[in-house]
Each structure stands twice: as structure tokens, then as C-alpha cells.
Image (tube, rainbow, N blue to C red):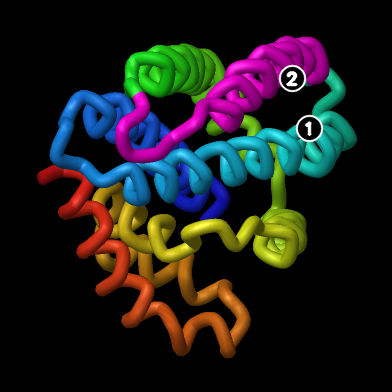
Amino acid sequence: MAIIETRLAHGMHRTATSLLVEATGRPTVPSTALAELRDFLVANLHHHHESEDGLLWPMITAVEPGAADGLAALGAEHVQLDAVLDALGEVEIRDGVDRAALREAAMAVRDLVHRHLEKEEPLLFPALRDHVSPEAWADFSQKVIATSPTEAAHLMVGFFDEVGTPEEVESVLSALPEPARQFVPMMRTQAQAGLAVLRA
């Protein structure tokens, strides 16, 4: 489950960062849709790597101290990611404003995220398989869910649907609290409409 959840999260980040760059080049995409995707990305990427640095890396190194150097190097790249995310978050997005600055900032985030994940996955996936028990992962996952940002949360469902199989997505979403699970069908519909606008 740890690898499935992580793979879906990484797939979402790859797809979402690429989509923001593509959508900024389409004059027909409304500024509100771009701002929603931008805000979703900034909040979720910050939360994702903060959860890794604060919870997941210590969990792994407690069992496998030999992983510490590699995870520390990944953590150092998270500092770089903070900087480009903050720059992206500060770009003004409204109708009538040139989108060149937004596109440049979105490209910086996309490029860094894609490079970072290429380095992270060969180290992280074996560590999750070999050193993180199902019980430890379930505890970590619940902490992540409890602190997840709410900005455009429906987009997460939409991106998961795009990068995972229906069975994988159902497995991941089944970990949501019961009140939240009731809203998944509505969130899915909302996400499909929002992603269609961004890709139009």
C-alpha cells in the first residue's frame, strides 16, 4: 500500500505540474482555473515534502540508518522546492495580466519536481518495501490525511483517477474519514469539469 499511495501522489505531482505549464499557454483558460490549480499545487507540494521530512524520513532511518544520507540529500532539494513554490505562489493571476511570469514560475516548479522524483523513487520505493511495515505506513498515512490542505481538494481525486487504476484509487480513497468519503463522487465530477477547462 505504501508504494501504491506514493506512486499515485508522485503521478499526481508530475501530471499537475505539467498541466499548469501547458494551461498557462492557452489564452482561453480562465484565470480562476489557473489560480485554482496553482494554489492546489503549492499547498499540496509543500505538505507532501514536509510530511516526508518530518515524519517519513525519520520513520525509515529509525529502521535503516544507512538510508540517512540519501534521504538528507532529498531533504536538501526540498529547500530548493520551497523557494520555487513560494515564487509560484506570489505570481499575480487575473484576467488582463501577462501570463509569462506565471509560465516561467510554473516551469521552474515542474522541472524541479520531475528531476527530484527521478532521484527520489529509486531510493524511496525499496525503502518503503523493505523498512516500513503496513502498520507504520497506516499511521503515517492517517497523519498525512489529517493535516492535508483543503485548497481545491477535488483536484486530487481527479488526478488520482488519471494516474492510477480504479482499484488503486479506491484503495487510497478508502483511507479517508467516512464524512469525506461521502463527497468523493461530487469531488470527482467537479474535478473532471475543472480539468476539462484547463485542457480546453
Q: Which mark is residue 123?
A: none
Q: Residue at x 52, y 44 (%)?
A: 39
Q: Which mark is residue 53?
A: 1
Q: Residue at x 47, y 45 (%)?
A: 9
Nearest the eye: 167 or 157: 157
Nearest the eye: 53 or 191: 191
**Element type at mark 2:** helix
Categorize mark 1 by other alpha carbons within 10 Å: few (<14), some (14-19), many (20+). Answer: some
Determine whether 55 is above or below 1 in the image.
above
Q: Residue at x 67, y 17 (%)?
A: 83
- Residue at the spot of label 2: 75
Distance between the Cα atoms at labels 2 and 1? 6 Å
Determine whether 73 is above or below 171 in the image.
above
Q: Is residue 74 magenta?
A: yes
Q: Are marks 2 and 1 in contact (CB under 8 Å)?
A: yes
Q: Amino acid at mark 1?
A: Asp
Residue 177 lies, in percent from the top left, at: 62, 81
Location of the C terminus (image quadrant): top left
Nearest the eye: 95 or 105: 95
Residue 25 lies, in percent from the top left, at: 20, 24
Residue 129 falls left or right of residue 16 = right
Which span of residues is magenta-colored?
68-97
